[in-house]
Image (cartoon, rainbow, N blue to C red):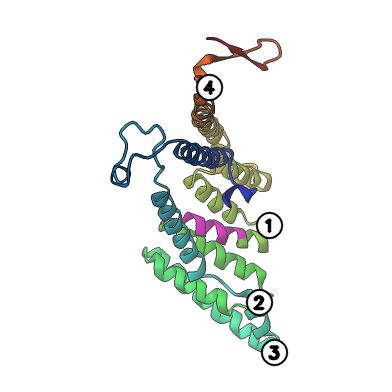
Amino acid sequence: MSERLKNTNISNEEVIDDLTKDLQFALKTEDKDNVIEPDNKANTSHSSDNTFQDIPVEDDQETTEKHDDEEKYESDSDSIDEVSLKDAELDLTDDEKEERRTIAEGLKVAGNDAFKVSEYERSIEKYTEGLKICPLQFTQQRSVLYCNRSAAKIKLAKHKSAIRDCNKAIELDDKYIKAYLRRAHSYEATEKFDESLADYKKVLELDPGHREANIAVHRLPPLIEERNEKLKTEMLGKLKDLGNMILKPFGLSTNNFQLEQDPDSKGYKINFKQ
């Protein structure tokens, strides 16, 4: 079993993808074991009638690694080490903590000013500086800094990083409507429609008359249904390919089996046809 399949958080279509690749490799290996190669020279050329061509795993892996590196960069470049902050605050007096809070407030204002003139990278830097100096006990101020930073990241289309900031803002203030709204926006931008809908519903719990949330809870369900239908079609296609690979050695294909739905039970039965 591949390492990806051991991860319980992967989707069904990813599981089928892995199984299909594994089966392709197994069938190719078995084929090779049962065939006498003509000579080494012939082996250097690719057979034109090879049924199972190699999947370009290298390209997929490079893309995945690049994506992971980008996510790591987003996460590490402005991450806040709260353990170190807590340790650094142990010997601070109340006056010193208040002084740091004031400095953090000034950095937040500087971040807001940069945001207003579309200097989003600079605004992120200022909010980050504020988070690194603002004492942990001032949870409301830190929540605002995280939420404001998420707004700047959204402007730069760094939605996954923005979601992480909104998570922190909500962790510090679970009634922070702006944080839920911004997270809902980033969830939708990354096609996580279910999570986006849940956040909009949470906004309506806190503010039943919120206009944007009321519109979103009617707009998102059709998008969720459309996405689910698309995923179902893709998954059935992969299952069909998988079935054809299994049945091929027996001279059969999925076309030999007909799937019929029972109108009463809504269950399915499979009929074999020659």
Q: Indicate the amino acid at tag 3.
A: Thr
Q: Earlier in the sequence, mark 3 or mark 1?
A: 3
Q: Earlier in the sequence, mark 2 or mark 4?
A: 2
- Give the CA distance from mark 1 to mark 4: 59 Å
Q: Position of residue 226 (x, y in %)?
A: 51, 30
Do residues under tags 3 and 1 come within 8 Å of each other at their CB atoms? no
- Give the CA distance from mark 3 to mark 1: 29 Å
The residue tagged 4 is 250
User: For residue 134, which quarter of the picture?
Assistant: bottom right
Q: What residue lies at 45% left-to-right and 58% top-to-bottom?
A: 65
Q: Position of residue 237 (x, y in %)?
A: 49, 28
The residue tagged 3 is 93
Q: Earlier in the sequence, mark 1 or mark 2?
A: 2
Secondary structure of the residue carrying tag 1 is: loop
- In depth, the one of 216 and 249 nearer the eye is 249
The residue tagged 2 is 83
The residue tagged 1 is 174
- Give the CA distance from mark 3 to mark 4: 79 Å
Q: In the rendered image, is residue 152 in sight?
A: no
Secondary structure of the residue carrying tag 3 is: loop
Q: Is residue 88 above or below residue 42?
A: below
